[in-house]
């Protein structure tokens, strides 16, 4: 199979979908890998390293997209829609529940779209986890930064100093992103509370976080009582493949103190506040009701080399299986890939995505028989 690795075109997206090590795995299996010129430079991987791994450097995005399967980091944006076609396998983060135009385009072009974020092993999302870990840890770092008065925040040092109380961080969601956000915030010295609805997960958090963070059952009343005194809020809620629930209403912003910082990790899935809208690394923040919102839709792209390595570690084995077997056989033989299939043969094959856009849903088995 020909496997294409195009350069990412989203604003300030420096990650690349595969390291030279991942490419070597594919070429050793007999596949031809087409890497767009300087696709890896943002992550510190020059063309020469890909050539040494057996790849062919191609001059344009169109050349890379001409492959049988394209591996990306981020979902295609409008300028890439022209490359979508019926015989294409697209393996990337898709986040379709928050993007109706792309969902419609994948269906219209009959693309086999396999989303990293819905590949599932038991209750785990193994291809989403590494980016959730980075986004979670990063959220506390950027939150602490924007709390400074110079950046528009309250002027609160999240970790405090001797004789001065630390800042308060409220983390909505105790999954992979939430627990990583909590560990870093607690490591800085903040007073950390994690909101969660899963009692089993709260017991796990209580054990793993020891006395560094507290858990609180997530409901509207507890959230309303916490908001007036919090300095940093991190939205880390996740419904796999579906739109994020809007847990924070505009009205709730009015009870917060001006300069409170809200970091919305869930923005890739539409955001968990009514006031959330996607921003970029070039222009990351905005204010609503005097609350600083940081809603960058590709947070891990800021740490491109770490993120590229972590992503390749998770995705390369599955990319190789798809290339070895073809998409239909991979769906049959690799059960964890089945929920990853979001579009196929002109149909939406992930139910939460179909529901998000009021589009027809059709299971893979119904299509191929």
Image (cartoon, rainbow, N blue to C red):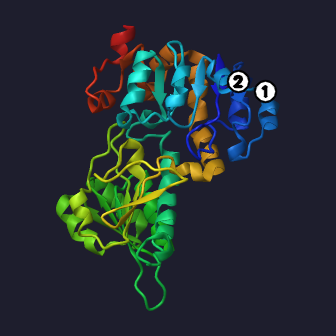
Taking the spot 82% from the left edge, 36% from the top edge, the residue there is 48
Which residue is the site of mark 1?
A: 54
Residue found at the very far left of the displayed protein? 221
> Whole-percent x and y of residue 101?
39, 28
Image position of 344 (left or right of 3): left
Q: How many marks?
A: 2
Q: Which mark is residue 33?
A: 2
Q: Is residue 142 above or below residue 242?
A: below
Q: Quadrant of the N terminus?
A: top right
Image position of 50 (left or right of 176): right
CB within 8 Å, label 2 to label 1: yes
Q: Is residue 104 above or below residue 140?
A: above
Between residue 75 and residue 223, name the one nearer to us.
75
- Mark 2 lies on a secondary structure that is strand
> Whole-percent x and y of residue 73?
56, 37
Q: Quadrant of the C terminus?
A: top left
Q: Which of the two labelled residues, at mark 2 and mark 1, occupies the earlier sequence position?
A: 2
Image position of 72 (left or right of 204): right
Taking the spot 42% from the left edge, 28% from the top edge, the residue there is 102
> Whole-percent x and y of residue 231?
37, 72
């Amino acid at each position: 199979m020909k496997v294409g690795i195009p350069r990412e075109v989203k604003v300030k997206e420096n990650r690349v979908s595969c390291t030279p090590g991942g490419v070597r795995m594919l070429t050793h299996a007999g596949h031809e890998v087409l890497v767009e010129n300087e696709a890896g430079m943002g992550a510190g991987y020059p063309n020469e390293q890909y050539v040494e791994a057996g790849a062919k450097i191609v001059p344009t995005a169109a050349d890379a997209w001409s492959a049988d399967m394209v591996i990306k980091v981020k979902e295609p944006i409008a300028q890439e829609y022209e490359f979508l076609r019926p015989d294409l396998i697209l393996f990337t983060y898709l986040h379709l529940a928050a993007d109706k135009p792309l969902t419609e385009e994948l269906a219209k072009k009959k693309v086999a779209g396999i989303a990293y974020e819905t590949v599932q092993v038991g209750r785990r999302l193994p291809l989403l986890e590494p980016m959730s870990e980075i986004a979670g840890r990063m959220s506390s770092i950027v939150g602490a930064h924007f709390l400074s008065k110079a950046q528009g925040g309250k002027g609160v040092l999240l970790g405090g100093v001797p004789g001065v109380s630390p800042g308060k961080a409220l983390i909505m969601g105790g999954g992979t992103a939430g627990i990583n956000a909590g560990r870093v915030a607690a490591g800085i010295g903040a007073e950390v509370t994690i909101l969660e609805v899963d009692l089993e997960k709260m017991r796990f958090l209580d054990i793993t976080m020891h006395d560094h963070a507290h858990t609180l059952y997530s409901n509207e009343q507890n959230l309303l009582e916490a908001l007036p005194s919090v300095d940093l809020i991190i939205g880390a809620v996740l419904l796999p493949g579906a739109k994020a629930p809007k847990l924070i209403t505009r009205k709730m912003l009015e009870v917060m103190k001006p300069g409170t910082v809200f970091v919305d990790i869930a923005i890739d899935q539409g955001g968990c506040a009514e006031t959330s809208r996607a921003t970029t690394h070039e222009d990351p923040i905005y204010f609503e009701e005097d609350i600083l919102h940081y809603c960058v839709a590709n947070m891990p792209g800021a740490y491109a080399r770490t993120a590229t390595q972590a992503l390749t570690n998770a995705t390369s084995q599955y990319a190789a299986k798809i290339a070895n077997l073809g998409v239909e056989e991979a769906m049959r033989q690799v059960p964890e890939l089945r929920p990853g299939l979001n579009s196929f043969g002109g149909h939406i094959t992930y139910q939460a995505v179909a529901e998000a856009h009021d589009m027809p849903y059709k299971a893979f088995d119904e299509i191929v028989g």
